[in-house]
């Protein structure tokens, strides 16, 4: 537990430093490095890392994705995704008799989703009131997880997903959703007072968005656990002692980020 707390504290400090320089190239570089590590974890987990052509294009795609949002490389995420897909199909033909096709397709889907998630974080941060949405995402992912851990440890009795994630409970799910909702509402009220540009805060809409966000977070977490269970591994990596790898820490956040990207396309929580 001590190692986990120290590692988490270091991660929070690095996150704060990165967010301070969020308007600069620092954010893109940090996200690029995180994406590169994530690509290694995906390829290593699915055992496709020895398929060199596929491993190379996947790593390049993950990193370049982070630099499409602000136009640093002059082409869009859609364009590089199409290129990556075409190259992936070529790699399938090259590796057909050497690499497990199921693993290659699993790696392809994971690389795409993780690339979309991490690049969307940059896009959301750059949007108007972007930090508001980013903090809500963080609460939905990590606030829910914290609440679920403590409530589940204290009173959890009914298993939520006994095969894929034995420690998760229904009580923890509810506790995490309640803590997340409280955190989101408190933060939203403070934000509306502290930020002068805020004209309207839609608290009624935030309530279902936060609750559903908690559920989406759990889906992301259990989905990541399912993949680990399939490949018989405990963690995706070891870069964060006590937490595992990048994907172990960001699995739920990436799912919530995709969810919040959709919400932002439909309506605004803050104006």
Image (cartoon, rainbow, N blue to C red):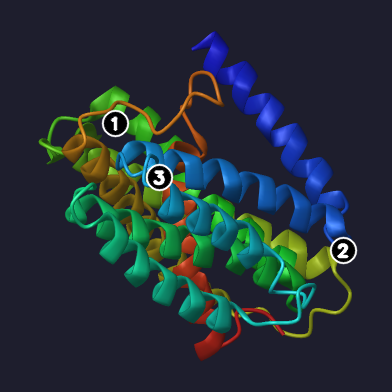
Taking 209 as reference, is 235 left or right?
left
Q: How far apart are marks 2 and 3 (CA)?
A: 29 Å
* Residue 77 % position (x, y): 59, 77
**In the depicted structure, whether residue 63 falls above or below residue 203:** above
Q: Quarter-wise, where is residue 211 in the image?
A: bottom left
Q: Which residue is rendered at x = 77% and y = 75% of the image? A: 70
Most extreme residue toward the top, as rendered? Answer: 2
Write down the residue under mark 3. Answer: 42
Discs 1/2, front:
2
- Determine which residue is flagged by label 1: 152
- Front residue of 197/141: it is 141
- The mark that comes first in sequence, 2 or 3, is 2
Q: Quadrant of the C terminus?
A: bottom right
- The residue carrying pointer 2 sits among few (fewer than 14), some (14 to 19) or many (20 or more) residues within 10 Å by Cα, namely few
What residue is shown at x 30% (from left), y 23% (from top)? 154
Q: Is mark 3 on a helix, strand or loop?
A: helix
For the residues labelled 1 and 3, say whether their Cβ atoms are less than 8 Å apart.
no
| Residue 212 lies in quadrant | bottom left
Q: Is residue 236 left or right of residue 186?
A: left
- The answer to whether residue 74 shows anywhere in this view is yes
Which is more toward the observer, 67 or 87? 87
Up-down: is 204 above or below 17? below
* Residue nearest the observer in this picture, 119 or 143: 119
Q: What element carries label 2?
A: loop
Q: Nearer the viewer, residue 216 or 111?
A: 111
Q: Which residue is drawn at 86% across and 79% down?
A: 197
For image coordinates 49% across by 47% down, the residue present is: 39
């Amino acid at each position: 537990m001590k190692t986990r707390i120290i590692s988490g504290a270091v991660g929070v400090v690095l996150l704060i430093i990165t967010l301070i320089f969020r308007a600069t190239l620092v954010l893109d570089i940090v996200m690029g490095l995180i994406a590169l590590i994530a690509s290694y974890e995906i390829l290593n987990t699915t055992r496709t890392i020895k398929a060199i052509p596929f491993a190379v294009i996947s790593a390049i795609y993950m990193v370049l994705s982070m630099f499409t949002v602000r136009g640093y490389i002059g082409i869009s995420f859609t364009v590089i995704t199409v290129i990556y897909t075409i190259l992936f199909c070529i790699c399938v033909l090259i590796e057909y008799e050497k690499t497990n096709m199921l693993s290659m397709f699993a790696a392809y889907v994971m690389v795409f989703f993780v690339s979309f998630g991490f690049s969307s974080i940059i896009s959301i941060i750059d949007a108007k009131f972007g930090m508001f949405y980013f903090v809500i995402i963080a609460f939905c992912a990590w606030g829910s997880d914290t609440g679920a851990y403590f409530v589940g440890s204290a009173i959890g009795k009914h298993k939520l997903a006994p095969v894929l994630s034995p420690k998760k409970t229904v009580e923890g799910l509810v506790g995490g959703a309640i803590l997340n909702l409280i955190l989101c509402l408190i933060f939203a009220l403070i934000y509306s007072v502290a930020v002068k540009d805020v004209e309207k805060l839609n608290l009624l809409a935030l309530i279902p968005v936060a609750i559903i966000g908690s559920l989406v977070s759990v889906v992301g977490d259990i989905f990541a656990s399912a993949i680990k269970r399939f490949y018989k591994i405990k963690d995706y990596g070891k870069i964060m002692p006590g937490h595992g790898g990048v994907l172990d820490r960001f699995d739920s956040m990436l799912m919530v980020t995709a969810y919040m990207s959709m919400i932002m396309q439909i309506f605004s929580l803050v104006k």
